[in-house]
Image (spheres, coloured by chain):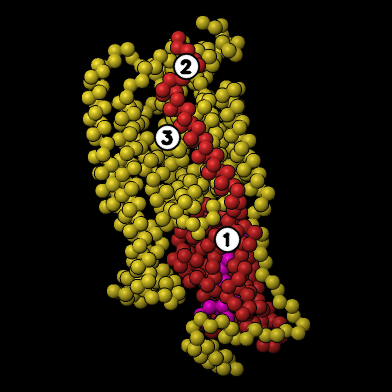
Amino acid sequence: MRAVVIATMLTAALGAAYAAERFPPPEFTDHALPAPATPAARAAWLDYADAAALAVALGLASWLAIKRRSRAGIVALMAASLLYFGFWRSGCVCPVGATQNVALAAFDAAYALPWTAAVFFFLPLLFALLFGRVFCAAVCPLGAAQDAVLVRPAAVPAWLQQGLGLLPYVYLGSAVLLAGLGGDFIICRYDPFVSFFRLSGSFEMLLLGAGVLGLSAFVGRPYCRFACPYSVLLRWASRLSAWHFRIAPDECIPCRLCEDSCPFGAIAKPTPSDAESRAAGKRRLARLLALLPLLMIAGGALGWAASGRIARSNAVVRQADLVLLEEQQPSAVPADEVTAFRKTARPAAELYAEAARARDRYAVGGALLGALLGLAAGGRLIRLSVRRTRTDYEADRAECVSCGRCLRFCPRERARLGKASAT
Amino acid sequence: MAEDKNKLTRRGFIARGALGAGLLAVGGGLGGLLASGRSRTVWQIDPDKCVQCEKCAANCVLDVSAVKCVHAYAICGYCDLCTGFFQPDAGKFVPGAANELCPTGAIKRSFIEDPYYEYTIDESLCIGCGKCVEGCAAFGNGSLFLQVRHDRCLNCNECGIAAACPSQAFVRLPADQPYLLKTRGTTESG
């Protein structure tokens, strides 16, 4: 009996490698076949709850920062956001990551952008256009996690802050390129806090998270300032904001009390009066304008050169490389990618052609990305070299996250609250 | 602060124009996308593409993967000698850790009628390694297959397993049709 079964099995296996029903399913008379269980996905109304929570939190943050001017209120909202968007929602979906969904939808017509991702991407930008970076202030769980542990902020020198401030551009550009061309979501993969929110994750990610949190105790919001790709978009929107958080409630009496109160280097000081000559400023501006195209060309060339390496993150390119390697040097146990490809029974030439097309797209994308990063770097140099006369202490609209820490130091604010006499 | 507040400077005009353009772009983008009304998507494994590489067990962000083995009973041959259940070199065809493929003993074998046995998966024990799926696909009807279980899946924006999957078998499905089940007569379905 057993020998027969085994023999049948072997013939079946040899005969048709992938044919189903080698053994006809029995027809039972008195045995009902169980149905496989299919637990439902998360209920749709919870999506609406998430979107509503985001809208309410953004509205509340705007009111607390601009109208109510309450640091205590912002801290409370921050804690609530950390609990809801961080721990309860496990950090997904968030506006930072939704950037990739939007990029993928823009590049790949076959990808249907879920409406939650659209809302999470656009709503904080809309609020930033109206009220500044209120999303960063009290809604973003990543920002809240860093803000909560900031105990001894050290000042980051301006040159370092401006230099490192270019990293978010690099991150955003790479994330858009990789998500758009390969569906590879690096922002999510290297999110340093998500493993804390989930209380699980790989050792490397937990280590990275612990490192960033440790750094956050001494450097104000390092991820927000020197990594967050979404911050690039928020900064641009916030620069244009119709209303923005203000340090002094009415009029600044340049008393210098708030000068060192910002751990994020977001307070713009009044410009000194011993300005350089206009001619010297013009010469520097001309030099920087001439440098701009050079930076863009250099960036483009670098991006082009690096594109081959970047393309390897693409699943098709990786598979084609492995199949080619296997063809040249067959191994005893082929890579899983090779097995998967053989199962499809497609000709290898077709895969190679597809991979070559993908590589071309990465080459163009890489060059474009490099050129844009050159433009960002040059643009920043030009912006820093242009002098604007300022007489007051103001919140730098791009850098300021409306956290409200400076309010406590402003005598005008204390007068408004009736805690001190107006000077 | 002496300047007239109502006077529109050139810089002020440009800033206001840029703000208007920004609001239009963001509002338009949001409105357009909402009007197209896409539902949320969830991750799922296309069983036809799966090569049982065992990465599902290790790459999920959860400690125990959200991927589990699912049994399409209608396809199952109810074999006495199940190649998804027994080790290829099992000495005796009786259940027991030494003879079973499943590293956690998550498959239960129960007698139905001679010579048929039914194999049920205890999902609380299953770790989604796919060893049984491989055995069943190699010599059997392929009635065992892997699926993302949505009562466990966190639906990460980037699924850790999807990123590691060598056969690009992870697909996004609309949240209201979240499974790709094998059914009799066809390997497609839903």
The one nearer the camera, A292 or B21, is: B21
The magenta-colored residue range is B135-151
Q: Is residue A218 magenta?
A: no
* The C terminus of chain B sits in image quarter: bottom right
Chain letter, disc 3 residue? A
Whether pointer 2 and pointer 3 mark residues with C-beta atoms closer than 8 Å, the reply is no
Front residue of A86 and A287 = A287
Q: Which mark is residue B144?
A: none
Q: Give whichever of discs 2 and 1 has the lower sequence position.
A: 2
Nearer the viewer's eye, disc 3 or disc 1? 1
CB atoms of marks 3 and 1 within 8 Å: no
Residue located 56% across and 48% down the image? B33
In terms of image quadrants, where is residue B44?
A: bottom right
| 2 vs 3, front mark | 2
Q: Amino acid at mark 2?
A: Lys
Determine the chain carrying the residue at label 2: B
* Coordinates of residue B130 in the picture (x, y in percent): 53, 70
Which chain has been coloured yellow in this picture? A
Residue under circle 3? A225
The three-letter code of the residue at mark 3 reads: Arg
Q: How far from the left and from the top, in percent, is residue A135?
A: 53, 35
Number of marks: 3
Q: Which residue is mark 1?
A: B173
Specify whether disc 3 shares its chain with disc 1: no
Quarter of image, res A311: bottom left
Chain B as rendered: colour: red
SS type, badge 2 = loop
Residue at x-position 44% and y-position 34%: A236
- Residue B7: mark: 2
Structural crowding at the residue carrying mark 1, measured as other residues with C-alpha within 10 Å and reported as few (<14), some (14–19) or many (≥20): some
Crowd rating for badge 2 (residues with CA inside 10 Å; few <14, some 14–19, many 20+)? few
